[in-house]
Amino acid sequence: MTAINKVTVLGTGVLGSQIAYQTAYHGVDVVAYDISDEVLDKAKARFAGLAQTYKAEVDGAADGAADAALDRIRYSADLADAVEDADLVIEAIPENLDLKRDTYTKLGEVAPAKTIFATNSSTLLPSDLKGFTGRPEKFLALHFANHVWRQNTAEVMGTDSTDPEVYRRVVDFAAAIGMVPIEIKKEKAGYLLNSLLVPFLSAAGQLVVDGIAEPEMIDETWRIGTGAPMGPFQIYDVVGLTTAYNISAAGDEGQRRFAEYIKENYIDKGKLGAATGEGFYAYSVE
Ligand code: NAD
C-alpha cells in the first residue's frame, strides 16, 4: 500500500496546528492552509509555541527534532496551491456544517484525484459531509484529541462508502505519526471517547445540581472506587468550563441547570478551568 508522504491541514487553530505539527514532527511534509496570510502569521507563532512544548514534554524533541519539524511546514492561503500534491488533506476548520460543506465542495474541485480527505470534526458524522466531497470512497473521519502529543488517540471512522484500502492507509498513517489508531467499525456520533466521556461528565453534573454531593466528594468517590487518577470535575477543569457550559446549555433540562450552575458559580467569577488557574479547583499557572 502506498504510504502517505504529503499532508495538507486545513485550519491552523487549536487542533489543526497540533495535527500539522505532529505530522511534520514525524518526518512528513506538511502544508498548513488557512483563510488569510494574517491568520497564517498567527499560526507561525502557534507552531513555534508547539516546538517549545515538545522540547519540554517529548523525549528527544530538544535535540533538534522540534526545530526540524518547523522546517517541514509550508504555509498557504490558496486552497488549490495548498493541496496540489497532497496524499491526504486533514480538515480542522470550525465546527459549522455549512462552512464544512462549502469547503469540501471547493476542495473536491481543486484537489488531485489521488487525494484522501479526512475530517477532524468532533460532532458531525462523516456521512453529513461525504456527498460534498466529490469522492466519498476517499473520505472518512480522523479524529484527534486536544494535546495530540500526549492524548494520542486517533479515532478512524469511515462511512459505508469509504474504500477499505483508503481506511487502512489512514490507519497506517496515524500510527506512523505517533498516534494510537482507534478503528471504529460503524459511524457513531461522539466516536468512542466522547460517547463514554460526555454521559459520564453529565451524570456528575446532575449529582451536584440535585444536591446529592459536592464536586470534591464525587471526584474522591470516583478515584477511590475505580482507581482512576482524576474525577469528573478535575476533567471538567482540563476541558475548560466554557466548553462545559456550551455543551450543557445545549442539553436537556437537567443539563441546562448544570450549565447555569457553572455560569453563576464559576464562569461569572472568572474561574474557567485549569488553563486560567482556577475552576472547580485552584492550580498554579506558570
Ligand atoms: P479553531 O477555531 O481553534 O480553529 C479553526 C481554524 O480554522 C482557524 O484557524 C480558522 O481561521 C480556520 N478557518 C476558518 N474557516 C476556514 C476555511 N474556510 N478554510 C480553512 N480554514 C478555516 O477550531 P478547533 O478547536 O481547532 O476545531 C477545529 C475542528 O477540530 C472542529 O471540527 C472541531 O470539532 C475539531 N476538534 C476540536 C477539538 C478541540 O479540543 N478544540 C478536539 C477534537 C476535534
Image (cartoon, grey):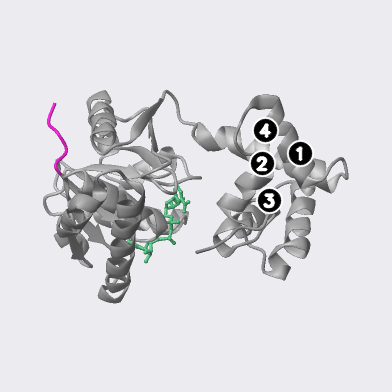
Residue nearest the viewer, comparing 136 with 223: 223
User: Mark 1 highlights which residue?
Assistant: 218
Left or right: 164 as drawn, with respect to 192: left
Q: Which residues are magenta?
A: 1-5
User: Mark 3 highlights which residue?
Assistant: 248
Q: Is residue 265 above or below residue 3?
A: below
Total numbered labels = 4
Please report whichever mark, 4 or 1, sits nearer to the chain's N-terminal start. Answer: 1
In the figure, residue 118 lies in which quadrant? top left
Query: Tag 4: residue type?
Result: Arg
Query: Tag 3: residue type?
Result: Ser
Q: Residue at x 61, y 58 (%)?
A: 283
How far from the left and from the top, in percent, is residue 135? 25, 40
Q: Residue at x 14, y 26 (%)?
A: 1
As helix, strand or loop, the secondary structure at mark 3 comes to helix
Query: Tag 1: residue type?
Result: Ile
For marks 1 and 3, give the one nearer the viewer: 1
Left or right: 17 as drawn, with respect to 70: right
Residue nearest the viewer, comparing 118 with 193: 193
Q: Is residue 104 above or below residue 263?
A: above
- Examine the structure image and report whether residue 195 is included in the region drawn in magenta: no
For marks 4 and 1, give the one nearer the viewer: 4
Alpha carbon separation for disc pair 4 and 1:
9 Å
Label pair 1/2, CB-CB below 8 angstroms: yes
Alpha carbon separation for disc pair 1 and 2:
8 Å
Left or right: 56 as drawn, with respect to 37: right
Alpha carbon separation for disc pair 4 and 2:
9 Å
Query: Tag 2: residue type?
Result: Pro
User: Mark 2 highlights which residue?
Assistant: 232
User: Mark 4 highlights which residue?
Assistant: 223
